[in-house]
Image (tube, rainbow, N blue to C red):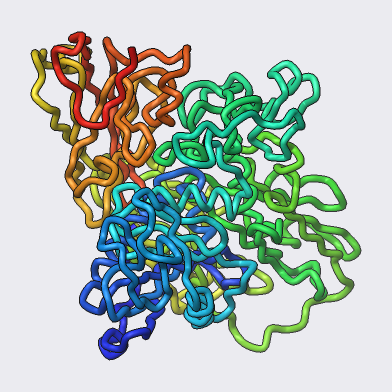
């Protein structure tokens, strides 16, 4: 996402404690959306561009992770630029570890100095009250429909969850904290860590069954027999790597409790949600968290409708699929509507006294629980009984204009479903026509010209101009309204750079480039794109789940990612593990009897996701990491397993 909000007023930027609200994405009224509000703490007036850059990076990483990626238009996003008199936050173990007076009072500890491994960024005295004051600047936002994220101006890792979450601006892993924390505060998901204190096994879970939807003590057979927990997903390839099954540890316990996947985002940040987590997140996003009701607007159901009217509904708009709209008369589905958002009562021969219903549903394959799929968060019904007589005469011609649409302020991706909504004359449907580079598209045959699936057009790579025009068929030559988008149908490019190998072999035919290393190696990835905006890079090791490339934890920007046979410990977490169990591990897990160091052959795939959401086709290289029996030293912090 390219930040395109209005620039803040210059005068406001000079006063310490002042704040400017910048709407970044507003897709509907606050009461109909989840409202993500991003604030900054510890950014001086001179550092405000750094805050904007940090926000862009955080958002683009979030939008690269499902289901935020597909359901991004279910959110309004606001940025609040808060001017601090000092740079940084309090008790930062990597930045002086001193007290600083910042507007939101973010801190790593209540008393400085903080522990060197401190990672919880909390609000100090008066910080929560300041947060409420700043958020109150946005009309219509309430405690129920909002999620705040306050970004601390530091490169030190840290953050907390809850409905007022925090993270850090320039830490390599900073943008990965907020999607994990939204898993807690929005999805109600639990941590899947094997510990409470880092690198200290969390101990045995009690023998009782946990209430968490993604933790259990049941066997796979018992889950199937009882139709409990994630039985519908068992055996599926996990979206976060491996296979959905039963993996021991979670809920901060190291044994006697099991989770669905080896490593989802709720265990190690950098990976994606698995199917169990994604299903819950879709339910909570679509249902607007506690409301549990999907937003649908329609012809009013509390006012009379007549046989000459046209009924209408306006649905929510996932980015890569359309919601399903089904009309019925007296309980009998009307098959000819073909997912139209409009229903012409006269054309359908509806008479006074008939009952018309419309059902809007999200038929995504990412939801398998019927109770969720058929519940209010993903399905809504509206009903009208047709009144006797004729509709009152319209006093004046209806306005012909678009009332909402896919944002036009930044490019849309080549696979997006672009949407528009129009005004609604009582007795007719306005015409919407679409064109690519001035060439009209024949989309009216679907009877739902409010949506345009760009993926179905199979556009060649390139940049296009898309337009939509609304007109009134009953008044030829009347004023029209037009919207224009840039379509970015060019995928980003990724290049890699490796540490010096012992030997290498170039790509040949279908064989990927191959490199041989002694004991360990490093990988740098860099992305380029033809459009502006932060580009997200991902890689995966041996097909085991896409992982966000952010360089190296707690290291300067541009530091390459390091792979070692058993991982390298940074602040009590092992990263870059080539051995069994995945890239990121708790160090104590590397000494379990079933752990095997990762010497031998490996495949590394890599790809990028640009600001418009285009994903490049994965490319790959292969490596062989040889065991030298200690002849080649491992880098500092690397785990050595006998």
Q: Position of residue 337 (x, y in %)?
A: 67, 49
Q: Position of residue 536 (x, y in %)?
A: 30, 45
Q: Position of residue 406 (x, y in %)?
A: 44, 61
Work out whether 494 lies above or below 152: above
**In this picture, residue 210 sits left or right of residue 418:** right
> 450 or 426: nearer the eye?
450
Residue drawn at (79%, 69%), measured in percent from left and top?
301
User: Is residue 234 in sight in this rendering?
Assistant: yes
> 529 or 548: nearer the eye?
548
**In this picture, residue 67 sits left or right of residue 503:** right
Q: Position of residue 365 (x, y in %)?
A: 60, 35
Number of numbered discs visible in the structure rendering: 0
| Rendered image quadrant of residue 260 | top right
**In this picture, residue 218 sits left or right of residue 538:** right
> 158 or 390: nearer the eye?
158
Residue drawn at (54%, 69%), measured in percent from left and top?
28
Q: Quadrant of the C terminus?
A: top left
């Amino acid at each position: 996402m390219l930040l395109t909000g209005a620039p803040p007023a210059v005068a406001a930027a000079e006063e310490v404690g002042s704040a400017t609200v910048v709407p970044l994405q507003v897709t509907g009224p606050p009461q109909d959306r989840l409202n993500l509000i991003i604030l900054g703490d510890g950014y001086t007036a001179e550092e405000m561009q750094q805050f904007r850059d940090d926000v862009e990076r955080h958002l683009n990483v979030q939008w690269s992770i499902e289901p935020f990626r597909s359901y991004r238009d279910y959110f309004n996003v606001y940025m609040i630029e808060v001017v601090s008199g000092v740079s940084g936050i309090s008790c930062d173990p990597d930045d002086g570890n001193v007290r600083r007076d910042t507007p939101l009072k973010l801190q790593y500890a209540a008393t400085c100095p903080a522990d060197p491994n401190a990672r919880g960024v909390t609000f100090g005295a008066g910080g929560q009250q300041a947060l409420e004051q700043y958020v109150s600047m946005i009309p219509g936002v309430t405690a129920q429909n909002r999620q705040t994220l306050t970004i601390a101006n530091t490169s030190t890792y840290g953050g907390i969850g809850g409905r007022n979450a925090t993270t850090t601006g320039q830490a390599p892993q900073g943008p990965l904290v907020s999607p994990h924390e939204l898993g807690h505060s929005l999805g109600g998901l639990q941590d899947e860590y094997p510990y409470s204190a880092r690198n200290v096994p969390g101990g045995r879970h009690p023998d009782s069954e946990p209430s968490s939807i993604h933790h259990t003590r049941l066997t796979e057979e018992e889950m199937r027999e009882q139709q409990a927990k994630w039985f519908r997903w068992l055996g599926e390839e996990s979206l976060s790597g491996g296979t959905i099954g039963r993996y021991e540890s979670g809920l901060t316990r190291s044994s006697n409790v099991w989770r669905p996947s080896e490593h989802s985002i709720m265990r190690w940040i950098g990976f994606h949600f698995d199917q169990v987590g994604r299903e819950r997140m879709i339910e909570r996003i679509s249902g607007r968290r506690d409301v549990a009701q999907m937003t649908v607007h329609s012809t009013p159901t509390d006012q009379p409708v007549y046989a000459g009217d046209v009924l209408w509904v306006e649905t929510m708009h996932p980015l890569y699929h359309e919601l399903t709209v089904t009309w019925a008369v007296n309980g009998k589905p009307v098959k000819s509507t073909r997912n139209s958002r409009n229903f012409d009562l006269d054309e359908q021969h509806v008479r006074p006294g008939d009952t018309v219903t419309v059902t809007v549903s999200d038929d995504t394959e990412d939801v398998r629980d019927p109770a969720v799929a058929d519940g209010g968060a993903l399905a809504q019904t509206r009903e009208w009984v047709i009144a006797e007589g004729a509709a009152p005469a319209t006093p004046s011609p209806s306005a012909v204009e678009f009332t909402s649409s896919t944002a036009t302020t930044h490019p849309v991706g080549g696979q997006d479903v672009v949407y528009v909504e129009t005004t609604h004359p009582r007795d007719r449907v306005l015409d919407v026509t679409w064109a690519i580079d001035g060439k009209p598209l024949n989309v009216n045959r679907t009877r739902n010209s409010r949506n345009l699936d760009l993926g179905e057009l199979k556009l060649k790579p390139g940049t296009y101009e898309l337009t939509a025009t609304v007109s009134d068929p009953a008044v030829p030559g009347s004023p029209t309204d037009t919207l224009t988008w840039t379509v970015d149908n060019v995928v980003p490019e990724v290049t890699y750079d490796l540490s010096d190998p012992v030997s290498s072999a170039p790509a040949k035919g279908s064989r990927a480039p191959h490199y041989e290393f002694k004991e360990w190696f490093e990988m740098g990835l860099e992305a380029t794109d033809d459009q502006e905006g932060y580009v997200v890079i991902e890689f995966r090791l041996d097909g085991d789940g896409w992982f966000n490339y952010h360089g190296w934890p707690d290291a300067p920007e541009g530091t390459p990612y390091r792979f070692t046979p058993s991982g390298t410990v940074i602040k009590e977490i092992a990263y870059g593990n080539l051995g069994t169990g995945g890239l990121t591990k708790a160090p104590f897990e590397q000494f379990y009897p079933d752990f095997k160091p990762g010497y031998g052959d490996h495949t590394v795939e890599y790809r990028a996701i640009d600001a418009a959401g285009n994903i490049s086709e994965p490319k790959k290289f292969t490596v062989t990491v040889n065991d030298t029996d200690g002849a080649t030293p491992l880098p500092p912090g690397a785990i050595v397993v006998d």
